[in-house]
Amino acid sequence: GQQVMQIPQYQHVQEGEDFTTYCNSSTTLSNIQWYKQRPGGHPVFLIQLVKSGEVKKQKRLTFQFGEAKKNSSLHITATQTTDVGTYFCAVAGGTSYGKLTFGQGTILTVHP
Amino acid sequence: DTEVTQTPKHLVMGMTNKKSLKCEQHMGHRAMYWYKQKAKKPPELMFVYSYEKLSINESVPSRFSPECPNSSLLNLHLHALQPEDSALYLCASSQGEGETYEQYFGPGTRLTVT
């Protein structure tokens, strides 16, 4: 099935610092989704990227899809304590239509 | 209404018990999913229902039995579970089954098997 490597596994930042998490695939992706899971919560959909080289912004969050559609990143500018949580990328499952495979996630801690 | 609800929130059961997890959505979504999530790990897909029919079973042990009574409801019947089955069980739904649809997750049922 489709697999994606996500790094880093953990990231500790001071409030106000920037944060980036990366997802990489060895194969070309049709699209990629990003989810956020707060501590004790459930995954919440953030965005979907479909086009090669696509860049989308949501306030302080910037999402990019690589030109070769094999990698993606999520960048948060000037982190806030509300950004704490685990950020997952998720990709379609290849042969299993409808299957979403999640990256391992990046756990973000923001120190005030 | 963009909410997926799950009951119960917490469940403790013995290895000989039979219990059921319930999930409901009223968004008119045609695909519904069960995921299992261990601490500090990503959700792992268990089952997918599309138009009330089971379309994906990720080789889940038979002690987990899904059921989709109608397009809004999804159940997961549990029987003779093992302690390693303790986890957060998440239900999700999407407009259709496919890679272009975002998934809406419920709050989950935290299951402990003793």
Image (spheres, grey):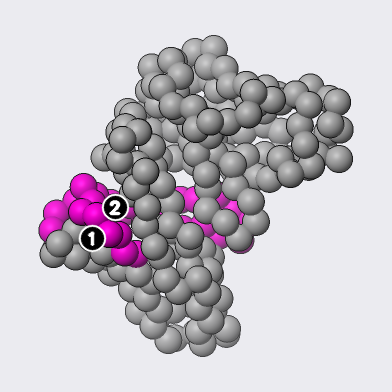
Is A44 in the magenta? yes
Residue shown at the point (48%, 67%) measured from the top left: A106
The answer to whether A95 appears left or right of B67 in the picture is left
Q: Does residue A51 lie above or below A10 as drawn?
A: above
Looking at the rendered image, the quarter that the C terminus of chain B falls into is top right
The chain ID associated with circle 2 is: A
- Within 10 Å of disc 2 (Cα), the crowding (few <14, some 14-19, many 20+) is many
Residue B15, percent from left and from top? 84, 31
Q: Which residue is mark 2?
A: A32
Of residues B108 and B45, which is closer to you in this image?
B45
Q: Earlier in the sequence, mark 2 or mark 1?
A: 2
Looking at the rendered image, the quarter that the N terminus of chain B falls into is top left
Residue shown at the point (30%, 68%) measured from the top left: A73
Q: Which residue is mark 1?
A: A70
Residue A39 falls in image quadrant: bottom right
The chain ID associated with circle 1 is: A
* Residue A46 visible: no
Is A12 in the magenta? no
- Within 10 Å of disc 1 (Cα), the crowding (few <14, some 14-19, many 20+) is some
Q: Does residue A31 lie above or below B20 as drawn?
A: below
The answer to whether A51 appears left or right of B36 in the picture is left
* Residue segment shown in magenta: A23-52
